[in-house]
Image: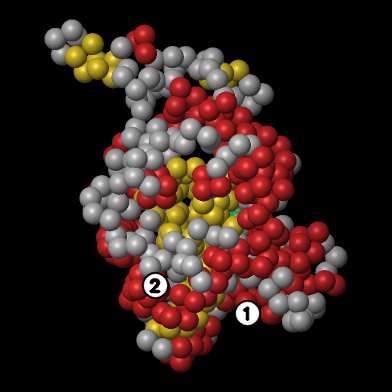
Amino acid sequence: MASRRLHLNAFENFSPGNIASGMWRHPQDRSSEYKTIRYWTRLARDLEQAGFDAVFMADVLGILDVYRGGSAEALRTASQVPIDDPLTVVSAMAAVTERLGFAVTLSTSYTHPFLLARSLTSLDHLSEGRVGWNIVTSFLDSAARNLGSGEQLPHDRRYDRADEYLSVTHKLWELSWEDDAVRVDKAAGVYTDPAKVHPLGHHGEFFSVPDPFIAEPSPQRSPLLFQAGSSSRGQRFAAAHAEGVFVHGTRPEALVPVVAGVRAEAARLGRARDSLKTFAVATIVTGETDEIARAKYEDLVAYADYDGAMVQFAGPAGFDVANLDPDLPLGDIDSNGAQFTARFFASADPDRVWTLREVAKYMAVGGMGPTIVGSGQTVADELERWAEVADLDGFNLAYAVRPGTYDDIIRYVVPELRRRGVLPDPAEGRRTLRESLFGEGAARLSPDHPHWRIRL
Ligand SMILES: Cc1cc2nc3c(=O)[nH]c(=O)nc-3n(C[C@H](O)[C@H](O)[C@H](O)COP(=O)(O)O)c2cc1C
């Protein structure tokens, strides 16, 4: 099998709990240190040395409060709460690294493009071009209640707003300031040449931004654009805007139509095949041998939290499962969300009867993504199989325990991937995030990107 090069990101968040609930109770877990700079700088150094491309920061703007009709269970089980602002850890990590990238999840539903563009430009300056934006449209009523107009926009309207949002940010990042606008000419007394800074004149359905951008262009100008969202509307959005697409599935076969769909749509928009990189989420439990890894997995499962899993399951699905019999098959639950989830898990194993209890077991260590258990060799085989079957360019690797999961991946899996030639040796010197994914010299948005068809 010809080796395909893989990209690795760490899938993190600024919280003691990410996609699997209960793991913070493990004796070796140090997730409660999430709010120290020390945690992030150590992680960043280790990941860069190992040759990871980026730290990918997930985020939510509301509490997962559907299960048992309130916030209590999410709070008790640290299910994505408490959670701090992921933008703020980037400077600290950038200060101790040279090549590692930082992709930050920010929602188009509850932020303004002018402010978001300035935050990301600031970090792209400070990191010398290593910032990415994971564009999400959000899905929580709790976020809408506290940040929006009280109610979420309907699903497809959120994407309409996101389309216009990206049109505004493109103008801010790419078109408002010319490359040679900043002169710093002390003799002439000209810092910025006013003739080279252009107003946006944007008057759209959702946003009005008449004036020029307030920040000068950063090394990448536009941050690397990631997207997560896999409905057909989400795929159309990804094809029009994203350079990296983040997908989740229980088996690589289940991802085939999603990845193929977004690639076909991108091709229809005139984009080259390799202008879009695809990443799947996975959690790895590894050790010296398959037996040791399996024992580690069994040990982790002992800390799984049924209520926490149900918080994570009910939040995105949007219906409360608290009063349901844990042994009821999902297919028998009368709700759209349940039917969607039933299909999602049926794709993991059609022969298993998927009940809430089985779902909680599945989600124990790796959430709704796969948990890959084994020696470095076994895990590398599995990652290569996923990439081959689903046509993936890489993985967002979640943690079970911090920092142990990443320590183990770096110790057992990374050397094996490198030995196989699918993970190159870490590059020397500085590099932008876009160059990490698309090669040297590719610091700026590709000329075939659909955004270039937006004109001032
Ligand atoms: C793999 C994956 C990761 C996601 N990560 C986040 C996240 O960190 N924060 C968030 O608010 N939404 C996240 N989303 C939700 C999406 O932005 C989107 O709101 C949701 O998936 C509904 O869109 P869709 O129907 O197109 O999938 C994620 C979605 C997927 C598929």
Is the residue 169 above or below the residue 104 in the image? above
Q: Which residue lies under the disc numbered 2?
A: 420
Whole-percent x and y of residue 289?
41, 89
Whether pointer 1 and pointer 2 mark residues with C-beta atoms closer than 8 Å, the reply is no
Tag 1, which secondary structure?
helix
Q: Is residue 179 left or right of residue 291?
A: left
Q: Residue at x 38, y 56 (%)?
A: 53
Q: In this view, does 157 lie to the left or right of 17?
A: right
Q: What residue type is labelled 2?
A: Arg
**Along the viewing direction, whichever of 303 and 157 lies nearer the viewer:** 157
Q: Judge whether residue 140 can be spotted in this image.
A: no
Q: What residue type is labelled 1?
A: Lys
Q: Which residue is drawn at 39% across and 55% down?
A: 54
Q: In this view, does 260 lie to the left or right of 202?
A: right
Mark 1 and mark 2 lie on one chain; the one further toward the N terminus is 1
Q: Nearer the viewer, mark 1 or mark 2?
A: 2
**Along the viewing direction, whichever of 380 and 189 lies nearer the viewer:** 380
Ligand 1 within 8 angstroms of badge 2 C-beta? no
What label does residue 361 carry, if any? 1
Q: Which residue is drawn at 62% across and 79% down?
A: 361
Q: Residue at x 51, y 44 (%)?
A: 275
Whole-percent x and y of residue 407?
34, 73
Colour scheme employed for the rendering of this structure = secondary structure
Residue farthest toward the left in the current orientation of the protein: 187
Residue 150 occupies quadrant: top right
